[in-house]
Each structure stands twice: as C-alpha cells, then as structure tokens.
Image (cartoon, rainbow, N blue to C red):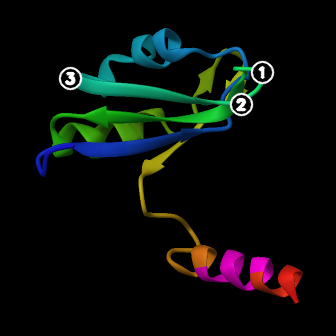
Amino acid sequence: MSSEEEKLFVGAHNFNTDKQALEDHRSSFRPISEVVVVKDWETQRSQGFGYITITNPEHASDATRAVNRESLDGRQIRVDHVGKSALGNKRGFLWGLWVWSQLL
C-alpha cells in the first residue's frame, strides 16, 4: 500500500458477501487498488469482514461517510478507516490485558 492509498475496514457484512460484491457496492469506493474478504482458514467461508484499499485518500473519507451503515446483502455494514475506532488504541491494549490474564 503506497502512502497515497487509504485502507478501509468493512465489517458486519453477510457471510456470503464476496470480493466482487464489496467491489461493486457503490461507486464511492472507486478507484480501488485491492479488495480482501477475510475467510476462515478451514472452511474458506467469509468471516464477515474485509478491507478495501482506495487509491485516493479523499475518496476514502467520502466513501466512509457515504457507505457506513448501509445495507449490503441484507446486513448493515460498518465502514471505517483502518486503525481508527470508537475505542481508539485502547481496544488493542484491553485485548492484550485479557489475553495476558488468560495465561496466568
């Protein structure tokens, strides 16, 4: 991913949603350099989230605002810039604490 590209997280989509469906959903995502649907290692079934890399950061912000909470394949999707969330960096820290507590 070049410094001029922006990666978006697309979550809560239908387990049957594939790369083509994500790529085809709304022209807000154009121009796209990469689409990834994260799949289960064993079943190769979608895990309900993926990533879209958009070549123009300004288009990425517009796409996030336009498409977040829209319906795709019968599910309301969540779109956000990678690395940004309502919990911010605390989520990773809290997850690490939980994992550590399980090891003790």
Instruction: Give the left or right position of residue 40, taking residue 5 as reference.
Output: right
Residue depicted at 62% across the width and 74% down the height: 91
Please name the residue that numbered disc 2 is placed on.
Answer: 40
Residue depicted at 48% across the width and 19% down the height: 22
The segment highlighted magenta reads 93-99
Classify 97 as above or below 82: below
Counting from the top left corner in percent of width and height, residue 66 is at 40, 35
| Element on which disc 3 rests | loop
Of tags 3 and 2, the one toward the viewer is 2
Quadrant in the rendering for residue 76? top right
Quadrant in the rendering for residue 6? top left
- Which residue is more in the foreground, 61 or 5? 5
Q: Which amino acid does label 1 sit on?
A: Thr
Please name the residue that numbered disc 3 is placed on.
Answer: 31
Quadrant location of the N terminus?
Answer: top left
- Marks 1 and 3, how far apart at CA: 31 Å
Tag 3: Cα neighbours inside 10 Å, few (<14), some, or many (≥20)? some
- Which residue is more in the foreground, 77 or 35? 35
| Element on which disc 2 rests | loop
Residue depicted at 52% across the width and 12% down the height: 21
Please name the residue that numbered disc 1 is placed on.
Answer: 43
Labels 2 & 1 near each other (Cβ < 8 A):
yes
